[in-house]
Structure formats: C-alpha cells, structure tokens
Amino acid sequence: MSSSPSLATTTPHPTPSQPTRSQRRSDSRREGASLPWRYLGYVGYYVGAGLISGAVVHHPMAPTRYSMIAASGVLVFLLATVLNDIVLASERQPLSRILRVLGTSTMLSFGLGMLSGGMQHFADLPERCAVLIPLGIVLSFVAFFLKEAKRPWRRIFGLMGLAILVVTALTFLGLRHIAPTMAEGSGGGHSHSDVVPEKGSDEGQEGERGSGTTNPTSQPTAPPKDSHPSKEPGHDDKHQH
C-alpha cells in the first residue's frame, strides 16, 4: 500500500511578489511629491523647539511676552508633528494614536527646549539652567519613548532608563556645583539685559553737562563806561598835539 505524499511536500511555497516597474515609479513619484512637505515639517520641529528654548529660559524676565512665545513654539511644533506623523504617514492613524502623538509631542517640544535653552544660557543664568538641563533630559527621553515605542514603559523603566537617570543625576549635581562660580564670574545678571541702557540715564547726564555750559549762573559783566564821553573813540589820551 503506497503512502500519499504529504501536503508539506506537495504544496508550493508562495513567492513574494516583486513590485513592477510602474509601481516603483509610482512610489518614487509619491516620495518626491511629499519631500517638500517633509522639509517644512522638519523646519517646524526645529523652529518650534528654538522658540520654546528661548521662552523657558527668559520667562521670569517678561512672563506675558515669553508665555506667548512658548505657546507659538508649541503650536509650530505640533503642526510639524501633524504634517509628518499623521498627514504624510503611510497608514491611516486611529484617533487614540493621533491624541497620543499630539500629547507626547508637546512634552517632547518642552523637553528639547529646556535642554537646548539651558545649554545656551548656562553662563548667563546658571542657577536656573542647572535645573532646566536635567529636567529637559528626563522629559525628552520619556516623551520620545511614549511617542515612538510600542512598549514604552519597558523601555523607560529598563536598563536605558536607568542609565538616563544616572546621567541626569550626575548632570544636576555637577551643574549645581558649577553654578555659584558662574554666577560670581558673570556678576549675577543676564548678559542680554546688561547691554540695554536705561532710558534717560545718558540723556540726564548729558543734560546736566549741557546745563553747566549753556546756562551759566553768573551774568556777563557789562563793559566799563567811558569816563570821558567827550573824547572821540579810539583817541589816545597820551597823544601830544
């Protein structure tokens, strides 16, 4: 009695279909059409993070002004996120994914802003930037993995998360140790405000100098009266006729 061949040996394996030339051209054309929009998206990332970095550092100097700048930076960053991660995405994203991307992108924008702004202005505001830099490291790390990873908490609380925590702690302790010496060297003030002259200070000094020259306190002395009015002007009294 002959045995029938098994299905595993008789059924042929399906070969993956290779894209045709027309499909490759279509994909290349689609990528070329989306490239300018991706450029705008990346510009929005960096511009938004730059606006936030300046706002979080300078916020105590003019809270209303820098709050508006920070809000503008967040808006630009979120528009770039929507363009790159939602509009230009290869697959349609569900609503839960869209909301998570928007929320984590807001966190990421502030984390990157704190990190870059604190590094730029540490010499100007060492005490404040010594807090912003470590906080920016932690916030950007957590926000990135919440946005990109499929199992973010395993990454955040894993070995890499422990390494980030150690780096953050060492950074905070080191910057707090250096900050007092930086503050003494810079005089404790922000360099941006040092170059702005106080309005009216120079004008007042110039006015005081000008008042001493243009408004003399002593009246000019009158020329002496001629004691001999009958004599002609310029006639020499010692002249002998």
Image (cartoon, rainbow, N blue to C red):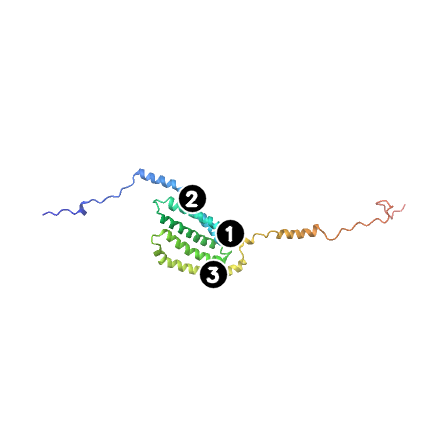
**Between 14 and 95, the one nearer to me in the picture:** 95
Query: Could you tell me which residue is drawn at 40 percent across and 51 percent down?
Result: 103
Question: How many marks overall?
Answer: 3
Q: Residue furthest left?
A: 1
**Between 67 and 135, the one nearer to me in the picture:** 67
132 versus 47 height, above or below: below
Determine contact: label 3, label 2, CB under 8 Å.
no
In the rendered view, does 3 fall on the left or right side of 156? left
* Amino acid type shown at disc 3: Arg
Q: Find disc 3 in the rendering and name its residue.
A: 176
**Between 69 and 180, the one nearer to me in the picture:** 69
Instruction: Residue 119: give x, y in percent of width and height.
Output: 47, 55
Query: Could you tell me which residue is drawn at 44 percent across and 52 percent down?
Result: 110
- Quadrant in which the C terminus is drawn: top right
Element at label 1:
helix
In the rendered view, does 202 fall on the left or right side of 234? left
Element at label 2:
helix
In three-dimensional space, the C-alpha distance between marks 1 and 2, rounded to whole angstroms, equals 28 Å
Q: Residue furthest top?
A: 22
Q: Find disc 2 in the rendering and name its residue.
A: 40
In the rendered view, does 61 fall on the left or right side of 236? left
Instruction: Residue 199: give x, y in percent of width and height.
Output: 60, 51
